[in-house]
Image (tube, helix red, strand yellow):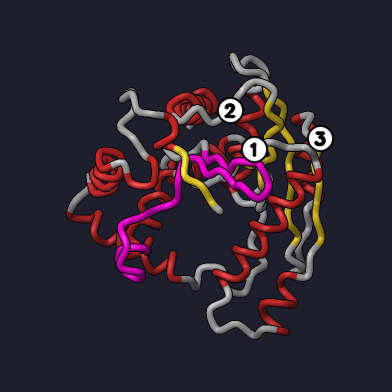
Amino acid sequence: MNLQKLMSYTRRALEDYDMIQSGDRVCVGISGGKDSLALLYALKELSRYYPAPFTVEAVTIDSGFDGSDFSQIKAFCERLGVRYTVVKTQIAEVVFNIRKEKNPCSLCANMRRGALNEAAVSLGCTKVALGHHNDDVIDTFFMNLLYVGRIASFSPVTRLDRTGISLIRPLIYAPEKELTAFAKNADLPVMKSCCPMDKHTVREDVKQLIHDLSKDNRDLKPKVFGAITRLGINGYKVPGHERNHNKTEQTDR
């Protein structure tokens, strides 16, 4: 995938779900993975000519894992002309040493999300952009179905009433394999995760299940995503289909 196609996926999501309004300051949460770096690249390029003018910030939540080095990401942000902020936390210490969580991913994700939202507010941002892609929408749907017994995924846009900001996910149309190719072609400074749970999560189990099912049904992913949009699950909609904007935005109280 080239930059033009990445920006096409991103702009389509921005327009379909009215993710950005004129004057927005968008905080991109940078984990160091390919998805968030690709999102930052796309949003920065789009900000140069998007009809609704907006600015971009980049923020990394340093969870405190040994071996984390964000110097290459800092250099990448400098090349893009994006201000980069690293927020140091003790999340790893709390989750693994103090709480000794047997299933740490949920608590860790909640703490990182809270720290990112606080950083966004302190920087004067109105939106927080997360790098969840099309495969993540489908994986999360299956995780909810199989492990929670609920028909749900995350929303394209989520309004956070407590902070006044909104979470947006502009990569919901971009397949993971294409983001992987873009990251390689663009030589993005992708960091290897230092988390001891990396590749040992329920999400990884579900991804493997979907991979196996897709061997005999190559259209599985687009079919599932199509069902999510046609049913309007969590505010998703069929592209180009007019709906009340209030129905496409979920609220976190």
* Few, some or many residues within 10 Å of mark 3 (<14, 14–19, 20+): few
What secondary structure is found at the residue carrying circle 2? loop
Callout 2, which amino acid?
Answer: Ile
Label for residue 60? none
What secondary structure is found at the residue carrying circle 1? strand
Which residue is drawn at the image coordinates 73% and 65% (left, top)? 63
Question: In this figure, which residue is indicated by the disc labeled 1?
Answer: 127
What secondary structure is found at the residue carrying circle 3? helix
Label for residue 78? 3
Whether tag 2 and tag 1 are in contact, CB under 8 A, the answer is: yes
Horizontal and vertical percent for residue 209? Answer: 31, 64
Question: In this figure, which residue is indicated by the disc labeled 2?
Answer: 20
Q: Earlier in the sequence, mark 1 or mark 3?
A: 3
Horizontal and vertical percent for residue 24? Answer: 68, 28
Horizontal and vertical percent for residue 46? Answer: 61, 22
Which residue is drawn at the image coordinates 47% and 44% (left, top)? 250
Magenta-drawn segment: 143-169
Q: Nearer the viewer, mark 1 or mark 3?
A: 1
How far apart are the alpha carbons under marks 2 and 1? 8 Å
> In the image, 143: left or right of 62?
left
Is residue 215 part of the magenta span, yes or no?
Answer: no
Callout 3, which amino acid?
Answer: Glu
Instruction: Relative to 70, say whether 43 is above or below.
Output: above
Instruction: Relative to 82, say whether 32 is above or below.
Output: below
* Few, some or many residues within 10 Å of mark 2 (<14, 14–19, 20+): many
